[in-house]
Image (tube, rainbow, N blue to C red):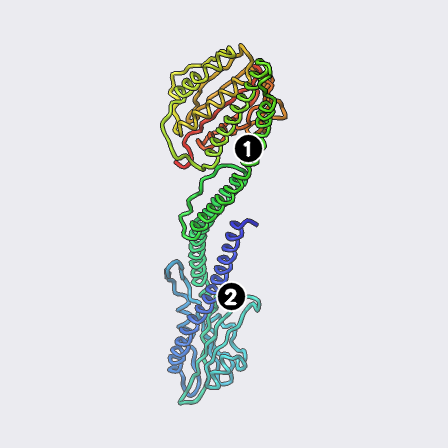
Amino acid sequence: MRITLLIVAGFLAIAGSGFFWLMKTISDDIERQYSQASEEPLVDFAHLFAALLEQDISGGKIDVTDFRSGFTNAYRREFLAKIYQIRKTEIHTHVYVTDETGTVIFDSDDGKREGEDYSKYNDVYLARAGDYGVRSTRTDPKDSRTSVFYIAAPLYSQEKLIGTLTVFRPETAMAPFAEESRNLVFRASLITAGLVFFLGSIWAYLVLHPIRKLTKHAQRITEGKQATLPPTGMGELRVLSIALENMRKEIEGKHYVENYVQALTHELKSPLAAIRGAAELIDEKMPEEKRRRFLQNILTETDRSENMVRRLVQLASVESRTQLEKREIIDLGNLVTEEIAGLSASIETKKIEVGRETTDQAMIVEGDPLMLRIAIRNALTNAIDFSPENGEIAISLSKEKAQINLSIKDDGPGIPDYAGDRVFDRFYSLKNEITGRKGSGIGLSFVRATMQLHNGRAELANHEGGGAEMILIFCGDTPGK
C-alpha cells in the first residue's frame, strides 16, 4: 500500500473512530440528562399536589372530588407553547392517588388505574415506608424510549399516613427535546468532522507532497533523465533532500567517470590501432605515394580521436547538469543561418542543396546559445553526412502556440527499423553507406541532452519522401527558471 493511502486511511480510521465514540457518548448522555431533568420537576409536582390534596382531607379520609374537577378542567385547556423548535399543545403529566391500603382512588389518566392495588409498586411502597418513592417502567420492555417516570409523595392527616400521591409522565414527552439535541450534536459533529478532514488533508498534503517530489526526482534519476533537485521547504525533508542529492552526485560522479573511461578506451582502440599500424609501416624507403596515404590515414584517425574526445567533453558537460546556468534570448532563425554558413565547406564539397522555408514569425527561445549552437550543428552535420552527393536538405521552422519546431530533412538512406529506438543512445552509431565509416555516436546524444535541458525534446524518424527527419521541439519555459 502506498504511504499516502496508508496515512490517509489511518487518519480517517482514527478520526472516524474518535467521532463515533464521541457522538455515541454524547447521545447516551443526552438521554440520561433529559431523564434527570424530567425527574427533578416531578418531585416538586408530587409534593405540591400532595400538599394541596391534604387540604381536602376530612375525618381522616381523602376527598378527591375537587381534585378530579381541577384536573379535568386543566386537560381541557387549549394552549400553544413554542419552546425553541418544539410546539407543545397538551399536558403530558398525570397523577394518581392511593388510599391507606395502596388502592388507587383517583387517576387523572381517564381513571385507568382506579380500583387497582398499587401497594407493591415501588413508588407507592417506598413512599409508604418513608423513603423516596420512585420507579420507572417501560410500556415496551425492548424500547427505552417508552419509559414512564413515577414519583410518589405521602399524604398525611394529623401526622398519620393515609395514602400516597404519584405524579407520572412518559419519557416521550421529553423526546422532542432530546431528539433536537441529538440532531444538533449530529450536525455539529458532521461539520467538525468535515473541518477536521479538510485540515487533515491539507496537513497530509503538506507532509507528503515533498516526499512525492523526492520520489519523482529519484525515479527520473533512475530512468537516466536530468532532474533538478525539487524544493521541499520543510526542515527535516529539506535536509534529507540535500543529503540525497549530494549522495546522488557522489555515486553518479563515480559511475559517470567509470563509464566514460570505459567508453573512451573502447572507442579509441580503433583509431589508435590504425595510427600505430600506419606508423609502424612507414619507412623512408617506402614509395612516396604509399607514404602519403599512410600519413593521411594517421592524420584522419588523429582528427577522429580529437573530435571524439572533444565531443565527449561537450557531452559530459551537458549530461552533468540538471539546469541551465546561462540563459539568453535567442533567435533560432539566425542561429540556424549562422550554422549553415559555418558548414558551407562540407555542403559545397558534397554539392548538397539546402532549402529553407521562410516565415515572418520570430522564432525566439530562451537558453544557452553555445549549447544550442553545438546541438544544431550536430543535427545539421548528421544530415550532411548521411546525404548523398547532389542531395537535398530541407530546413523549416514552425510555431504552434508556445511550441517551436525545427525540422531538418535529408534524402539519405534513412534509419533501419532496428535502430529507431537507439539513435540517441550514447556511442550508438550506424555505418554510413556513403563513406563506409561509423560515427562517434556522441553527436545525437548531445542533441538530446541539450533539448532536455531546454525543456524540449529531439525526435529522429524516417519521412515519407525517403531519408530521415530530425525535429527539435522547444516546448516553452526552460526548467529551473
Question: Mark 1: which amino acid?
Answer: Leu
Lower position in the chain sequence, tag 1 or tag 2 = 2
Name the amino acid type tagged 2.
Answer: Arg
Q: In the image, what residue occupies the spot 59% across and 15% down?
A: 290
The label shown at residue 27 is none
Image label count: 2
Locate residue 276: give its quadrant: top right
Q: Say which of 296 and 32 sits in front.
A: 296
Spot occupied by residue 397 in the image (x, y as percentages of width and height) = 44, 19
Q: Could you tell me how far apart the alpha carbons at marks 1 and 2 are, in whole angstroms? A: 89 Å
In the image, which disc is placed on residue 145?
A: 2
Q: Quadrant of the C terminus?
A: top left
Could you say whether the residue bearing mark 2 is in a helix, strand or loop? Answer: helix
Q: Position of residue 422 (x, y in %)?
A: 58, 29
- Foreground mark, 1 or 2, reads 1
Name the residue that disc number 1 marks: 264
Foreground of the two, 187 or 432: 432
Choose top left, top right, bottom left or bottom right for residue 274.
Answer: top right
| Image coords of residue 413 (percent x, y) | 59, 17
**Which residue is drawn at the image coordinates 49% and 72% (left, top)?**
111
Residue at x-position 40% and y-position 84% = 57
